[in-house]
Image: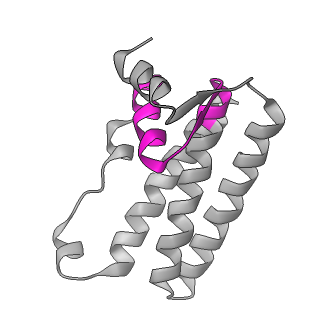
């Protein structure tokens, strides 16, 4: 086990749990629902709500991955750190990073949201691969 995971466990920011398929599936369902709502919000030109729903789609997808390995997070930061450690070889590094393009710097929210949703689609694909 990596020193980062050991530290998170010692600090109780990450907990060991029994891997439970029902719990994983519940999070995947939550991620799918939020992703559909994010896409709908984007289609309805509601960029702000699309960002919120897209974030929570990624959050639930990430929790599903973590639960599948027998861990539960106590913070969003611990979740991200644990994902980086546990799935380093299977998650594209770009899914962990928010890129600022020229469009985003000029305030094109819809362009940013479309790229965010494309990243979510990659995350969704990864989830389906790990089922």
Horizontally, residue 80 falls left or right of residue 108, namely right
Q: Quadrant of residue 106?
A: bottom left
Residue under the image location 65 percent in, 72 percent down: 37
Horizontally, residue 80 falls left or right of residue 18, namely left
- Residue 17 in the image: above or below residue 114: above
Indicate the position of residue 54 as horizontal and vertical percent values.
52, 64
Front one among 125 and 83: 83
Residue under the image location 65 percent in, 39 percent down: 64
Extreme-right residue of the structure: 22
Horizontally, residue 19 falls left or right of residue 60, namely right
Residue 31 visible within the image: yes
Indicate the position of residue 24 as horizontal and vertical percent values.
73, 38
Q: Main secondary structure of the magenta part?
A: helix
- Residue 85 in the image: above or below residue 109: above
- Residue 95 in the image: above or below residue 69: below
Is residue 68 in the magenta section? yes
Q: Quadrant of residue 19?
A: top right
Residue under the image location 22 percent in, 75 percent down: 103
């Amino acid at each position: 086990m990596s020193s980062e995971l050991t530290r998170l466990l010692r600090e109780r920011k990450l907990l060991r749990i029994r891997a439970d398929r029902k719990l994983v599936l519940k999070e995947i369902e939550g991620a799918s629902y939020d992703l559909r709502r994010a896409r709908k919000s984007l289609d309805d030109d509601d960029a702000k709500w699309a960002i919120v729903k897209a974030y929570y789609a990624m959050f639930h997808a990430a929790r599903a991955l973590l639960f599948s390995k027998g861990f539960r997070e106590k913070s969003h930061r611990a979740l991200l750190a644990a994902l980086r450690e546990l799935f380093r070889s299977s998650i594209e590094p770009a899914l962990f990073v928010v890129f600022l393009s020229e469009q985003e710097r000029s305030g094109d929210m819809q362009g940013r949201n479309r790229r965010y949703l494309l990243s979510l689609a990659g995350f969704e694909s990864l989830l389906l691969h790990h089922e």
